[in-house]
Amino acid sequence: MPADLILTVAVQGILTGLVYGLMALGLSVIFGVVRVVNFAHGEMMTIASYAAIVAFGAWNIDPLISMIPIAVLLFALGYAMQTVLINPFINRPEHSQFILLAAVAIIMVNGLLIIFGPDARNVLVDYALDSIEVGPLLIDKVRVITAVLALVITAGLFAFFKLSRTGKAIRACADNHLGALVVGLNVKHLYALTFGIGSAIVGAAGAMMTLLIDTTPNIGPVFTLQAFVIVIIGGLGSMPGALLGGVLIGLSEAMSGLFFAPSAKTMFGVAILILVLLFRPQGLLGRKA
Amino acid sequence: MSSLSLKDLDVFYGDAQALDGVSLEVPQGSIVAIVGANGAGKSTLIRTIAGIETPRRGQISYKGAQIGGLPSYKVCNLGIGQVAEGRQIFPSLTVIENLEMGALLPRARGKEKATLDEVFGLFPRLAERRDQLAGTMSGGEQQMLAIGRCLMGQPDLIMFDEPSLGLAPAVVQEVFRIIRLLHAQRGMTVILVEQNVAVSLKLADQAYVLENGRIVMQGSGQDLLHDDRVRQAYMGL
């Protein structure tokens, strides 16, 4: 097999992985602060994907543009979910939170099935098939653009948590819940805000994803699992970890497609997960508990 | 004039009653000590005033307004600050970030700069360590940070819950010096819950003894300090 081909596939895999990483970042942020595992994460991404597909189909809006209003929409959805549904469950046992969010996930998938049917849809922008030549490599233009956007959004989020008052207050809640109550932070509002931010991120990722893969309602659960795998590989709560995990998964998928069969791609992701759990259970960039 | 007043307060954790008909008065500008054994309900009392626990029955009024059942962020914004047991700082935030968190209350906005200078004046150690992660500091420094963070919120009344617990004797002296200073120079009202009964009674204008969630004795700090039952039960004399 020619080295150019391998390198091309590897680079494409890494670029796709950055978008996966962005998707998983939303899950990581929510868990890191609210300590709730969003079992409807992939389904929320799918909702965002369909919103982008509708916006393109009806008004010919590029997903890279529609991702902004879609992120806002998903922020509102996430904020409302935390306030209305999850807050009453916050002090209940984890399994009841799981059942709640699993139910939300099932409702989302079936709602999408009712509205859009089971057929795969995609967005064919006019630059969808363009590629960029880098030396001997031929890289898809959409993958380069979405990967750069994923990095920019992550950097923006990092700056938000590091520099803004609200971002610091959210970190304070994650750090010491009682301490946050003691200094008079509005913890419930900050939790809802965090859930909204995590949802907005997955919304942006979902809109971008329409340029990379076909969307069906049933990819929701697949991406929920994918997000878990990525976040656990990278380290729960670590922002660079989510990106690194995404890159590893994207790379392993691309390589398994090239050397074995595309249908074997999940196997390699899970194999990495098992190795990480065996040798570095806190995740590659995670901190020891 | 009474600043804070509790009337017939009942608080439950599930079915277990933690406070039973507690009534007390905290006059404006006074130091009130609350004394009692472990599990008597002292911390519950503080947490209930702070709005972290919700009373099942009874009234809490502050400067004439009913505050029972308000969420903690609203109570804090009325000027009721707290230095909690175990300090409750944010370990993975820096010292300066911890202090900023104290100043997010609407009542403290716009005064951060001046208050920060005051806090650094009171605790020069915090200024030296402003960019250090709070979790890497010593227990005494963390206690200074907890007090400084509370002051950033512009409180009129501060509740101290076991401020000397686990600290070296020299640091304990320093903590009590600060409490006295805040009271004398700034006219702050103080509620003091302290395992060191002798010191807290000496400091207090008024004191209450809490036993199994009930107030069993009350009086001036001096009276309780010389009361045989208090001396036997809490000072081992």
Image (cartoon, rainbow, N blue to C red):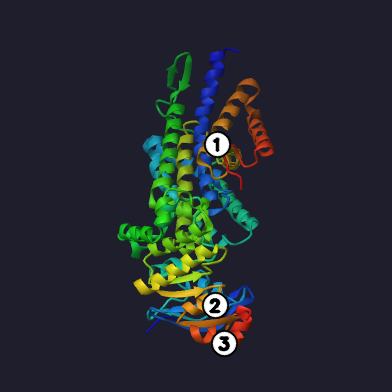
- Residue at image coords 51%, 47%: A29
Question: Is B177 left, or right, of A264 in this rendering?
Answer: left
Residue type, label 2: Ala
Q: Are marks 2 and 3 on the same chain?
A: yes
- Residue at image coords 36%, 66%: B154
Residue identifier under label 3? B227
- Mark 1 belongs to chain: A
- Mark 2 belongs to chain: B
- SS at mark 1? loop
Query: Decide: marks 1, 2 in contact (CB < 8 A)?
Result: no
Residue type, label 3: Asp
- Mark 3 belongs to chain: B
Residue B71, percent across and down?
Answer: 46, 69
Crowding around mark 1 (Cα neighbors within 10 Å: few <14, some 14 to 19, many 20+) is few
Task: For marks 3 and 1, give the one nearer the viewer.
Answer: 3
Crowding around mark 3 (Cα neighbors within 10 Å: few <14, some 14 to 19, many 20+) is few
> How far is disc 3 from disc 1 in space, using C-alphas?
83 Å
Residue type, label 1: Asp
Q: Are marks 3 and 1 on the same chain?
A: no
Residue identifier under label 1? A119
Residue A122 visible in rendering: yes
Residue identifier under label 2? B198
Task: For marks 1 and 2, give the one nearer the viewer.
Answer: 2
- Residue at image coords 58%, 83%: B214
In the image, is residue B148 above or below residue B195?
above
Q: Which mark is residue A167?
A: none
Q: How many marks?
A: 3
Looking at the image, tell me whether mark 2 or mark 3 is earlier in sequence order.
2
Residue A56, percent across and down?
Answer: 41, 36
In the image, is residue B200 above or below residue B166?
below
Res A55 quadrant in image:
top left
> How far is disc 1 from disc 2 in space, using C-alphas?
77 Å
